[in-house]
């Protein structure tokens, strides 16, 4: 197939004139076939990028896992220690409470004593409640109408009682050992004089 060199119309290979524009044709020169541009990829082979795991990321994950395990172990130990300590404290508290209750059972007691301060006979009533002591006493020569109030502290068998009159003024005090059935010690009057006493149930 040839083409008119003037108008480009298709012609037979042996034509002398163009059937379209009538121009006289030169000698036969095959027209080049129109080229068809076919895009060709520079590289038809797909890029294959190998996936390589990041060593630093792997190490970070590994380290984080180890840290979590250590923290979990530490928290478990702390929790166990806390439970043990709480158990011990509760046990000791219960023991102390039981001991205190037993002590209170012993100390919550009433005494009716009689004896003498120096050579003066007296009668005394005492109530021990924990570490507190209250009571009263009177001299036999004066009778129960002349009662003197007593307030004091009891600790490890040591009893100290402060004597007060009807105006709540301290007029003397007793200090001595209170045993199961007797109270023995020293009496101090308002002027600072001291006298021994011995009282028994």
Image (cartoon, rainbow, N blue to C red):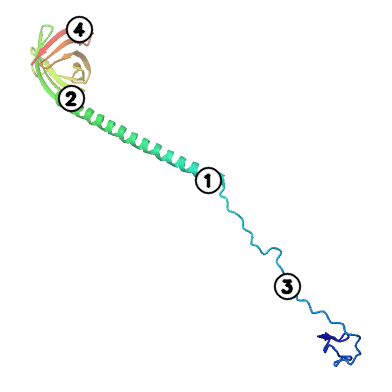
**Which residue, given by chain and number where applicable, does mark 4 sit on?**
194
Write down the quadrant of residue 149 in the picture.
top left
Label 3 vs label 4, nearer the camera: 3
Crowd band around label 1 with a 10 angstrom C-alpha radius: few (<14), some (14–19), many (20+): few
Q: Residue at x 22, y 16 (%)?
A: 170
Does label 4 or label 1 sit earlier along the sequence? 1
Mark 1 lies on residue: 58
Mark 4 Cα shell of 10 Å, populated few (<14), some (14-19), many (≥20): some
Left or right? Give the position of 40 relative to 165: right
Q: Is residue 171 left or right of residue 9?
A: left
Considering depth in this image, is 153 or 96 the residue closer to the camera? 96
Residue 38 circle label: 3
Q: Which mark is residue 103?
A: 2
- Location of residue 163 by image quarter: top left
Secondary structure at numbered mark 4 = strand
Seen at 16% across and 26% down, the residue is: 102
Identify whether 137 is placed above or below 19.
above
Query: Mark 1 to mark 2: distance in Å?
Result: 67 Å
**Between tags 4 and 1, which lies in front?**
1
Q: Give the spatial CA distance, label 1 vs label 3.
A: 47 Å
């Amino acid at each position: 197939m040839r083409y008119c060199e003037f108008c480009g119309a298709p012609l037979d290979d042996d034509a002398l004139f163009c059937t379209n524009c009538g121009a006289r044709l030169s000698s036969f020169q095959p027209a080049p076939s129109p080229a068809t541009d076919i895009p060709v990829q520079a590289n038809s082979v797909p890029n294959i990028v190998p996936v390589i795991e990041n060593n630093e990321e792997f190490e970070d994950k590994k380290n984080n896992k180890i840290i979590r395990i250590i923290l979990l172990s530490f928290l478990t130990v702390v929790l166990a220690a806390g439970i043990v300590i709480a158990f011990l404290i509760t046990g000791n508290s219960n023991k102390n409470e039981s001991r205190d209750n037993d002590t209170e059972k012993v100390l919550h007691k009433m005494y009716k004593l009689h004896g003498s301060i120096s050579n003066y006979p007296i009668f005394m009533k005492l109530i021990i409640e924990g570490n507190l002591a209250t009571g009263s006493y009177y001299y036999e020569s004066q009778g129960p109408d002349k009662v003197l109030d007593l307030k004091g502290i009891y600790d490890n068998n040591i009893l100290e009682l402060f004597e007060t009159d009807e105006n709540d003024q301290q007029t003397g005090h007793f200090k001595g050992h209170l045993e199961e059935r007797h109270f023995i010690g020293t009496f101090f009057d308002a002027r600072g004089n001291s006298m021994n006493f011995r009282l028994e149930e």
